[in-house]
Structures are given as structure tokens and as C-alpha cells.
Image: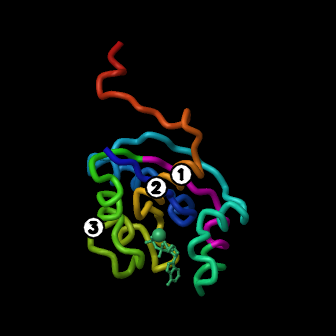
């Protein structure tokens, strides 16, 4: 089992695509462990995307990510990181695979509706960035049948 951090970016939230995107992730068998809506501050966005500091797209990326709320989520499953990256599609929405989340909901290589962790190390860091351990929920299929 593996966990991955998926962010629904401001473009998706503003277009009311949040629910449809979460549904795509659920449909590939990933299980939701945590979810939180928030508006990122500039410092938070800079910390989150620290690895991209100095790149030409960095400043506009920070502006974009702080422009409106996001929904931060954690999903768990076998090979969750790759599974999520696969269903998300490649970075540039206009070149992402047909049927992928980015192709169907995104615009281009900046406005691409989702973030997904790219490795186990990033996933751990990103999950810790948004959630306290007690905000991650583990549950079983039949738990609701009390
Ligand atoms: P990823 O989100 O597919 O992992 P990264 O290379 O980690 O892609 O870039 C982080 C984010 O920065 C992208 O999701 C996208 O929003 C933005 N970005 C990446 N490359 C470009 C670019 O060439 N132009 C504009 N924005 C970009
Ligand atoms: Mg990345």
C-alpha cells in the first residue's frame, strides 16, 4: 500500500470540477484518506513548490496556486503514486493522454487542474505539509454497517 498527495488546483475549484476529478481518482480504485479545502498563502505555495524556485514558470505558478482555494487530498492504494500520475496525465493538459484528468479538465502546461506526488519521498513530505497524522483516516469497506 502506498499514499499520494493530490491537490485540486484553483482552476479546477473555480470551474466546479472538484467532484468530477475526485471521482476519477476513486474510479481507479484509490481510497480517500484525507481532504481539506484552503486558500494557500504565498509563503505556503513557495514552500510547497520550493524545488521549482528559479525556473521561468515559478512566479506565475505561485500566483496561480494562491489565486483561489485548492482542495488538498490524500489517497491510498497499491502503487498509488504511479496510478494517480497515470490517470492525471502528463503536465501539459493540451498534450496529456485522451481521457486523462488533465486533458479533460485542464487548459495548458500551467493551468492543469491537479498536482500529484512524484515519488515516495515527495508524497511523505507533501502529506505532512498539509495534514497532521490524526487528519488521515483509515477505514474498511464495512465499517459503516453498525
Ligand atoms: P507536474 O505537476 O506534472 O509534476 P512539474 O514539472 O512538477 O509538473 O511542475 C509543477 C507545476 O508547474 C505544473 O503542474 C504546472 O502547473 C507548472 N508548470 C510546469 N511546467 C510549466 C511550464 O513549462 N510552463 C508553465 N507552467 C509550468
Ligand atoms: Mg511535480
Q: Nearer the viewer, mark 3 or mark 2?
A: 2
> Residue 99: which disc?
3
Which residue occupies 44% across, 40% down?
A: 33
Separation of disc 3 and disc 2 at Cα? 24 Å
Q: Are marks 3 and 2 in contact (CB under 8 Å)?
A: no
In the displayed orientation, state which residue is furthest to the front.
121
Q: Which residue is mark 1?
A: 72
On the picture, is 78 further left or further right than 94? left
Which residue: 60% across, 75% down?
61
On the rendered structure, is 117 left or right of 70? left
Report if the beta carbon of the residue with label 2 is closer than 8 angstroms to ligand 2: no
Question: Does residue 137 sit above or below 145 in this rendering?
Answer: below
Magenta span: 62-74
Q: Earlier in the sequence, mark 1 or mark 2?
A: 1
Residue placed under numbered mark 2 in the picture: 123
Residue visible at 65% across and 62% down?
Answer: 68
Q: Is residue 30 magenta?
A: no
Residue 6 image point, x, y percent: 46, 56
Calculate the distance from the C-alpha at mark 3 to the C-alpha at mark 1: 22 Å
Quarter of the image where the N terminus is located: top left
Q: Secondary structure at mark 3?
A: loop
User: Residue 76, how many percent across, how many down?
Assistant: 36, 45
Nearest to the observer: residue 20 or residue 126: 126
Q: Tell which residue pokes out farthest to the top in this image.
A: 146
Q: Residues within 10 Å of mark 1 (few under 14, many from 20)?
A: many
**Res. 13 image quadrant:** bottom right
Amino acid at each position: 500500500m502506498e499514499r499520494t498527495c493530490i491537490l485540486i488546483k484553483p482552476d479546477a475549484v473555480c470551474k466546479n470540477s472538484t467532484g468530477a476529478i475526485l471521482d476519477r481518482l476513486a474510479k481507479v480504485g484509490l481510497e480517500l484518506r484525507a481532504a481539506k479545502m484552503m486558500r494557500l498563502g504565498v509563503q505556503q505555495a513557495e514552500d510547497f513548490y520550493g524545488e521549482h524556485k528559479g525556473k521561468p514558470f515559478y512566479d506565475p505558478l505561485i500566483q496561480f496556486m494562491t489565486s483561489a482555494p485548492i482542495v488538498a487530498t490524500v489517497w491510498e492504494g497499491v502503487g498509488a503514486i504511479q496510478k494517480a500520475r497515470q490517470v492525471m496525465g502528463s503536465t501539459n493538459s493540451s498534450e496529456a493522454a485522451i481521457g486523462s484528468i488533465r486533458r479533460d479538465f485542464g487548459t495548458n502546461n500551467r493551468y492543469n487542474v491537479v498536482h500529484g506526488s512524484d515519488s515516495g519521498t515527495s508524497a511523505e513530505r507533501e502529506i505532512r505539509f498539509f495534514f497532521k497524522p490524526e487528519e488521515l483516516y483509515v477505514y474498511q469497506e464495512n465499517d459503516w454497517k453498525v
